[in-house]
Image (tube, rainbow, N blue to C red):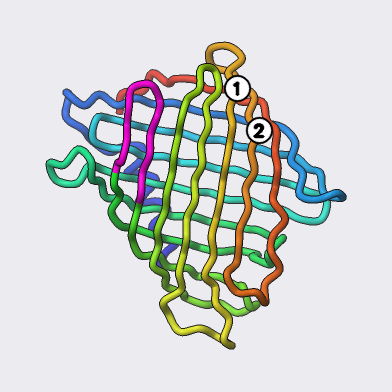
Amino acid sequence: MIKCFIPILFLSLVFAHDPDAELPDWKQYLRFGIVNAGSNSTGLASYARLKRTSPRSFRDLRFYGHYFKDDTDIRLRLKTSRMFLSFDWLYSFNTLIYEKNTFIDVNLRYHYNQGLGWLIRNSADGNMMTFELGIAFDNSDYLNTEQKTSYAKSGFTADRDFGPLHTKIEMDYFHQVSKQVDDTDLSRIQLVSEAQLSIKKGTALIFGFTQDFPIDESFNFETASVFLTFALKQPLNWTF
């Protein structure tokens, strides 16, 4: 059933309607570079993003892939959020993720989460901080069998500018609440951190890392993927 969410959420990203007073702002992002995941694993880093924002809504389609000789780490994420009722500090969100990560034996994982977020800080100079709580569901093959797993989800993000340097950290924690199979806990922490140095308008160099931390010690910890990419950002003159 979760596969049905992809066309529905994609159409909501592209064709969602806002009043005339809430003109949407579209941007696209592209990155290419190198990534390292250990002394013998250097590969290609890629990233593409399409973002639509209005005064009370946010829709984001994001892809990133790290390609190595023997392993791959690929994620496709679609996230939508909207201010909750009349509050300007509270929002609802839902996220759909398709993921392949051979470093931790995830051949394919369908993941969905939803909940409420607290906009702790959102300033015009680029400083932002959020905290999220919600529920999440996996259909994954960690144990080489299909499992439907449920979680309690919490997340934290922080963006801060220091002159030409923009920093970002994203951390999500998924605590398994459904019955464990073979006493294996699929709870995990996912971490992404970046430092972006602007070169000139629309271009930048980005240094960062991403890593998954399984809570169950029976899983091998994934080596951090450290990347250096050249980034392009471009506004789009779309009005829908």
Disc on res. 207: 2
Sooner in the amino-acid sequence: mark 2 or mark 1: 1
User: Where does residue 221 sit, x and y in percent of width and height?
Assistant: 69, 64
Residue 48 location in percent, x, y? Answer: 56, 35
Determine whether, in the image, residue 92 is placed left or right of residue 7.
left
Looking at the image, do the residues carrying marks 2 and 1 touch, with CB atoms under 8 Å apart?
A: yes
- What residue sits 54% from the left and 65% below the top? 188
Q: Quadrant of the N terminus?
A: bottom left
The residue sitting at the bottom extreme is 182
Quadrant, the C terminus: top left
Front-most of 156 and 74?
156
- Which quarter of the picture shows residue 115? bottom left
Under mark 2, the amino acid is Phe
Q: Is residue 147 above or below residue 223?
A: below
Query: Where's residue 161, x and y in %?
Result: 47, 25
Read off the residue under disc 1: 197
* Image location (x, y in percent) of residue 30: 58, 29
Report the predominant secondary structure element of the magenta stretch.
strand
